Amino acid sequence: MQIPTTAQIAATIPPPVHELCRRLRQAGKKSWVVGGSIRDLLRGKQVADYDVCTDALPQEVQRLFPRVIPTGIEHGTVTVLLGGEPYEVTTLRGEGAYTDGRRPDEVRYLTEITEDLARRDFTVNAIAFDLERHELVDPFGGLRDLEQRVVRAVGVPEERFGEDGLRVLRAARFVSTLEATLDPATEAAIGATLATFRKVSPERVHDEWIKTMKARRPSASFDVMLRTGILDVTCPELVATHGCEQNRWHVFDVWGHSMACLDACEGDPILRLAALFHDIGKPQSRAFSDRTSDYTFHEHERIGAEIADPILQRLRFSNDDRARIVHLVRHHLVCYEPSWTDSAVRRWIRRVTRERMEDLYALCRADVLGKGRPAPDELERVEQLRERAARVLAAGDALSTKALALNGNDLMRELGLRPGRHIGQMLEALLDRVLEEPALNTREQLLDLARTLPAPGATG
């Protein structure tokens, strides 16, 4: 990894941050750019947010800048608005006990940057940059750990994890996002501090999972969660997939396959979560077949969807995200054969919905790659299905009752029917015929077909 020079770091930091530090300096105060922004600058990565720490008290910062929001003033943090952008400014501080496993019960203000950095979670996040002197402040070897790609707790790991329960999950997340290894002493401290982790809100766990899914290999983080017990707290249903043997088409057990599928899945974090959960129903559906002398997993996709739904509710996923993931888990098993008729392709599109087809192609490709030894034609079949479905869609055939040449009002008016659930049932029956024979989708032919259907609402 090529570490930029201090001059390059200073030149990269945006002008409003320079201005913020300059005003503090003019007031006789010291300031440093700290935390994740310095870590990412040293890695040559784009920085989303810049945080500043200072020996100025929050009230002094408020007096120095015209637009300040007291976002966390009780813990020494305010947000300064400069150039239309928000910047968190925190007074150098030490902290008391963390009774709730999230925030310190009390803070005490400090004057030395080294003391402030000592309270931070990991060495790679305990680096500060002095914009005035163009100097890095790195008392805990964070730069060395960054170069060696090691995630290491600052000081005594048990103390850091006991202060804030989320830190164990952040340790796992950084293994993926920094493409690093976890320091053995830091990893060993996780199991003993899981009681504090249990106090962490589901919303914070949700956020860490989403950040993890943006890494190149999220599986590295989930492997850490598995072996340290983090996953036993957040998602024991996934733990059950570890050691669940698969059939002869797979190199890995269900856990290993899920991890390989997760890494191979292209797309956004929500799609990758579908990859994570796609086979979660296999432990419950696993059975040995004497006929094939192999394991089977009948209806694992249905069972998996039923398992995934409450997990996603528990982790506070939105209704839309939850519905998308559950739908993909439910329909991820696509057993396409070239012998499928166009009618079969139309029925598949109707079942999985047009909106989820691209998701399913990506998930299917990842599922195939995650086997470790896929059959040569499996990826080809995914592309064949995609081409067949594209042709069906281009033909404009009806795939929903809304696309039929008549509607419920037509049925009631022409056939003398009363309103009721049976109208929708008749439309579904007509669609079923049209999926088989698209040419039937004309008003006259559909009315003729409708007259042959049971009509419990007929006025006679």
Image (spheres, helix red, strand yellow):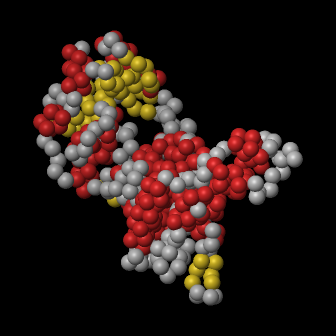
Report the front residue among 215 and 234: 215
Residue lying furthest front: 444
Left or right of residue 30: residue 280:
right
Rendered view: 17 above or below 419: above
Residue at (41% x, 47% y) in the render: 211
Q: Position of residue 308 (x, y in %)?
A: 59, 56
Q: Quadrant of residue 420?
A: top right
In this picture, residue 158 sits left or right of residue 406? left
Asked where in the image residue 385 lies, by quadrant, the reply is bottom left
For this view, does 332 lie left or right of residue 155?
right
Residue 12: give x, y in percent of width and height.
18, 35
Question: Is residue 142 visible in this depiction of the protein?
Answer: yes
Q: Position of residue 24 (x, y in %)?
A: 25, 19
Give the percent coordinates (x, y) of residue 441: 60, 54
Identify which residue, 259 or 289, lies in the foreground. Answer: 289
Q: How many numbered markers are drawn?
A: 0
Compared with 71, 126 (above or below) is below
